[in-house]
Amino acid sequence: MVNTKKSIKIALLAMLISWASPLLAHGLQMTTAQVVQRQGNYLFITIHTSVAKLYQQMSYQDKPASMMHLANGSEQQLGQFREALFELFRNNMNMSVAQQPLQSVKIRIATSAELKKLLHSALAEQVLSSQHHEQSHHAERKNYLRVEVDGFIAASHDTPRVLSASFPKELGQVLVSYTKPQIQTLTPSANGSQYIQALWK
């Protein structure tokens, strides 16, 4: 009886989410990637993407029928989803500088427990959006999957150094930003510390 009620609940929510899916195609759901260059030869990339949209685009063995089934599934299913995420970025995100692959590349993804919490939050947000016939963009951003990729630029005398990075097609459109922080150590005087930095026009 309990399993029957659970199945009915999942089916109803799945139908509601399916009805709301057109609302999830807005531009504010675009994937973002922040590329930060530190210490000259270290690159750190932070990717934020809609977990609902990404799951819909992914294909892997024994994938549950819907995100609802995954969120309410077993630990094994969550583990398979997490491993599929690793494989997706490991196999489809290639980065090089001056045609030399990044060294010691590491990929960081949320734990299975964090993924489960993220999935439930994303599902709840979809239901609320469908009930109000609109999206809560600020809330949805909190339900984005965060993926971190970092590595070191190989020693090279080639100039200029140009970064080339490919992203998995499952991410859709990607809005990329690049920064190289200018770091200063401020020594306080009698009047405190003074910070001066030239700004780009």
Image: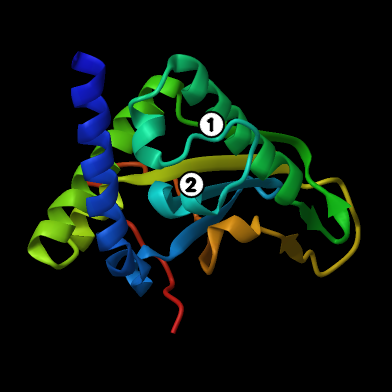
Give residue 100's position: percent from left, percent from top: 88, 53
Looking at the image, how many numbered discs can be counted on the residues?
2
Residue 62 is left or right of residue 128, and the answer is: right
Return the residue nearer the eye: 53 or 93: 53
Mark pair 1, 2: CA separation: 9 Å
Give residue 28's position: percent from left, percent from top: 33, 68
Return the residue nearer the eye: 171 or 70: 70
- Report the quarter where the C terminus lies: bottom left
* Residue drawn at 71 percent across, 59 percent down: 165
Q: Mark 1 points at which residue?
A: 81
Mark 2, secondary structure of its residue: helix
- Report the quarter where the N terminus lies: top left
The crowd level at tag 2 (other Cα within 10 Å; few <14, some 14-19, many 20+) is some
- Where 34 falls versus 65 (above or below)? below
Displayed quadrant of residue 90: top right
- Where 75 falls versus 123 (above or below)? above
* Residue 180 is at least partly visible in this image: no
Give residue 34's position: percent from left, percent from top: 50, 57
Return the residue nearer the eye: 3 or 156: 3
* Residue drawn at 32 percent across, 69 percent down: 22
Callouts 1 and 2 close, C-beta under 8 Å: yes
* Residue 135 is at least partly visible in this image: yes
The crowd level at tag 1 (other Cα within 10 Å; few <14, some 14-19, many 20+) is many
Return the residue nearer the eye: 11 or 159: 11
Give residue 173's position: percent from left, percent from top: 53, 69
Amino acid residing under circle 2: Tyr
Residue 184 is left or right of residue 43, and the answer is: left
Mark sitting on residue 55: 2
Mark 1, secondary structure of its residue: helix
* Residue drawn at 61 percent across, 28 percent down: 83
- Where 108 falls versus 37 (above or below)? above
